[in-house]
Amino acid sequence: MTSRIEAWLAAAIADADRRGLPDLKPLLEGLARSTENLRAADERHRLRAQPESPRKPEDA
Amino acid sequence: MTGPDLRRIADVAALTRTGALSPIDLVQSCLARIHDRRRVNAFITVLENSALDEARRAENEIRAGRWRGPLHGIPIAIKDLIDLAGTRTSSGSALPSIEATTDAPLIRRLRDAGAIIIGKTNLHEFAFGTTSEESAFGPVRNPLDLSRSAGGSSGGSGAALADGMCFGAVGTDTGGSIRIPSAACGIVGMKPTFGELPMEGIVPLSPSLDHVGPMARGVVDAAMLFQVMKGHQPTGVLNAPRRLVLGVPGPYFCDRVDDDVAAALARARVSLESSGHETVNVEIEHAGWTPDVYLHIVLPEAAAYHAPLLERHASSYSPGVRLRLEMGRYVLAEDYLRALDLRNALRIRVDQALDGCDALLLPTLPIGAPPLGAGTVDVGGRSEPVRGAMLRLTQLFNLTGHPSIALPAGAGRDGLPRSLQLVGQRNATERLLAIAAAVEALSFEF
């Protein structure tokens, strides 16, 4: 799990505990895994959408 | 020569039109069935008095030569997430609800066509579940095996139809909530193209994924209900191409299903091909993204609607539904936007898979109806959570907006129904219905 998602998860679990919702912890852990998958898919999708090398401006 | 199938609207309507069958008898037979089979728990509200009043009115109109069409005098059930004037819209919840003062527009269209609303059906609370177990009114039971789920979230509508308590029903579908109970109960259920039917007067779950549509015992019945809900004349079905080409998406859709589902799909392909149709293998690229993209859209959209209710009535929700809604409050905006972007990519991939095909053919559910209370199910030797398994094959088409219809495909060795779904081109729902009628006519009992 990336450090960004780990930090988000720790904050989310702490907030859920503060709100009296400890049962949310396993759901948030599942959501974190899903978010990691989503971001990986998004990154692959963006990479594929980009041209392989930046175009050089045409000479005038 | 076979006689009329008195479970189907199309056949019953021919008899009510001539006076050979009375709408009063139809309503009374449905009410008797609802009463006798209370353990199924399909209904939250039964409209006995108003349904009988409407039946008497329908009978008088038909006798006087004012037949309004094939839905005139036909008992229909609606999911209790949809407004019907003079009744509470409970959403299957213990939260305070108010009495609707007007009908949802599509209910008004059904009533204008002469349909009789016999009652409002039970559901998974706020349509946020696939089993119809988490309802303030108790779980819906599958009429074919009372120890099993009827599917969800439109479980009451599916159970009522399968058990003879009505002749048609209206459900909603955000990740499969029409098609899943249709599969679990062995009936037909369709979600049209996204945005095709009005959602006004219907409690939302996830507005960019929500669909409303018909449930019935046959494709022609579903087509008539859909046409009326759309504001058209109910002409029934529709001409399909003489020779169909159906694409069967392989990975993701067919690799984790039980043996009986795999056998149903194989039988369907043989039956189609021996009838002169063609089935071809296709791929929906990136279909594996579906559950993650879906989750990051449905959770925050549902949480946004429920946020003020959670502040005031948190303890009134079913615990599981409350937790899923609360989870949605933790999804970051950046991830919601990523999911919307990936959803557009998936829409293009489904369009590409449909290129050259009349429709896609794939399983609706990977399993038969699961036992009530089960947290996990065994799918092809692998244990997985019930909710994920039940949504896996349907939710993509809520993301992409393609129309999709679930058709019965015989029973498994456990005696429970199996189901296949057809997915059509966007904005070509009537064409999908025509294709489904042609497929249904092959009598796949498949």
Image: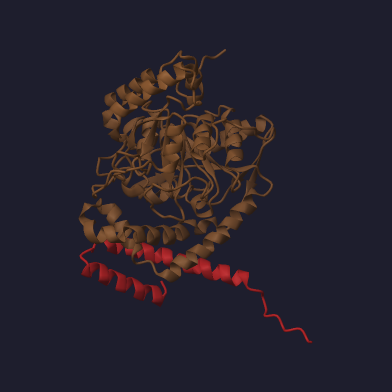
Chain colours: A red, B brown
| Residue reaching furthest to the bottom | A60
Instruction: Tell me where residue B10 appears, x and y as whole percent.
Output: 51, 24
Using the image as rendered, state which of residue B242 and residue B193 is in the foreground: B193
Instruction: Tell me where residue B124 appears, x and y as whole percent.
Output: 33, 45
Using the image as rendered, state which of residue B446 and residue B256 is in the foreground: B446
Could you tell me which residue is drawn at 32 percent across and 34 percent down? B42
Q: Is residue B276 above or below residue B171?
A: above
Observer able to see residue B412: no
Q: Is residue B360 above or below residue B72?
A: below
Q: Number of labelled discs? A: 0
Instruction: Tell me where residue B338 appears, x and y as whole percent.
Output: 49, 67
Could you tell me which residue is drawn at 51 percent across and 50 percent down? B195
Image quadrant occupied by the N terminus of chain B: top right
Image quadrant occupied by the C terminus of chain B: top right
Using the image as rendered, state which of residue B424 and residue B82 is in the foreground: B82
**Residue B373 picture quarter:** top left
Could you tell me which residue is drawn at 78 percent across and 86 percent down? A59
